[in-house]
Amino acid sequence: MVERLTWKRLVGELILFYLPWLVLGVIFGYLPWFLLIATWIQLGWHFHNQLKMSNWLWKDRSLTPPSGSGSWEPLFNGIYRLQQRNRRRRKELTTLIRRFRNGAESLPDAVVVFRSEGNIVWCNKLAQQLLGLRWPDDSGQPISNLLRSPDFVRYLSRQAFDTPLEITSPMNYDRTLELRIMRYTEGEYLMAVRDVSQLKQLEGMRRNFFANVSHELRTPMTVLQGYLEMAQDPEMLMGPMWDRAHGVMTEQLARMNALVEQLLTLSKIEAAPTIELEEIVDVPAMLDILEKEAISLSGNKNQSFKFDVDSSLKVLGDDDQLRSAISNLVYNAVKHTPSDAAINVRWYRSSMGPRLEVTDSGEGIAAQHIHRLTERFYRVDKARSRETGGSGLGLAIVKHALSHHDSHLEIDSELDKGSTFSFTLPSRLVADSALLDTVVHNE
């Protein structure tokens, strides 16, 4: 191990170097000249080592220091050790930065680091997607120039970040973003951005759900309350009045019972996020029963029915959920199709898989309503739906039941020409003949 350079060592080396020249100068009588020559040799030696150091630091940049002697050896080795320490620190810092960035990239939130004056230091990929930032092009740019929301600019200028801020996404105006800013290091801030659109939508759906349920139940309960108050005076319900009151109360109770039943069905389907699609569902037999029920439900509307069913096409799935989905589509066609209209139901094997189509020749649905039909309690014509006893939950049940079978509801409608509600199940859910024979044999 090389000793570090000290003033005692320097003085000792100078004495050892000049002592021979001093002796020679005394012996030969030319002391000043000998000392001058020794000084020039000393300066030349130092100059040579300075050049070696300069070439090592700026040109060679080798990890191994050049060889040196005397006082230059500890200098070369000291600089070499300093370089090694700096390399280790740089490596550790690089590893730390890489870990931070990898961690920030793994977060479900967009992350932006900016200085106190607002200039961007770094952002992750999600920030580029949600906020439209470009990295590294936007490095050093003022964040207020890139996020031009007036609310954000005011929020940034107030420097009060105790509460989060909600703004509209600059990339998609249908999205809502929640921003949280916190002090990161001295002179720097970290901003975390989260897409809360779904949370806002769920919150709105929850409010609408309770409002709609309350509204749907309030009307029949008000009717029942009115007749019960009238019943306190027996003379008010004498003769034909009682028959009418009894009929209305029975109708309103049936309406509330249907609403509760559909709410329970929807809740049951939603509470089962995954189901085992191993039960054989006899869809042809199910449609045979639904055809009779549809004719009975139609009553005197003089609707014509045509059921085109592949009697051999059975599927794997959940019998209750598929029955709820298919029956709702058929019942909706009967309820919301006017008199003297035709209703066609087709169950067949398509190139994509088992497919059901329920087609009517009724009034049709305007395009602006189609994408909202599967929302809870959504109705195209509220007055007409209440007349037919619709709760607005049928297609929501269909949507969730089909999603559990890796399918979705397709709606094709045109005003004054009719509508087609359909879905296609995956081909893998077809119950093959070998499986059916095994089930029959076991039974």
Image (tube, helix red, strand yellow):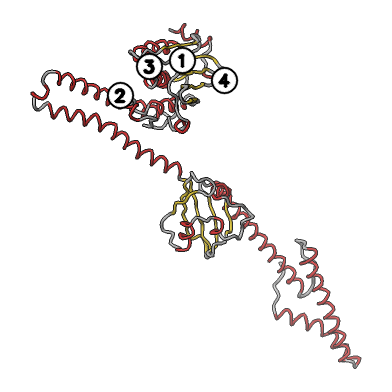
User: Which quarter of the image is occupied by the N terminus?
Assistant: bottom right
The CA distance from mark 4 to mark 1 is 18 Å
Quadrant of res 334: top left
What residue did someone put label 1 on?
345
Find out whether the residues at labels 4 and 1 contact each other: C-beta distance under 8 Å. no
Q: Residue at x 58, y 18 (%)?
A: 351
Residue 231's spot in the image, x, y percent?
A: 12, 26
Residue 322's x, y, as percent?
43, 20
Identify residue for label 4.
Answer: 352
Query: Looking at the figure, which quarter contains the C terminus?
Result: top left
C-beta proximity under 8 Å, tags 2 and 3: no
Left or right of 122 in this view: 157: left
From the image, tell me which residue sits under label 3: 339
Q: Which amino acid type corresponds to the residue marked 2 in the rendered image?
A: Ala
SS state under label 3: loop
Q: Which amino acid, mark 3?
A: Ser
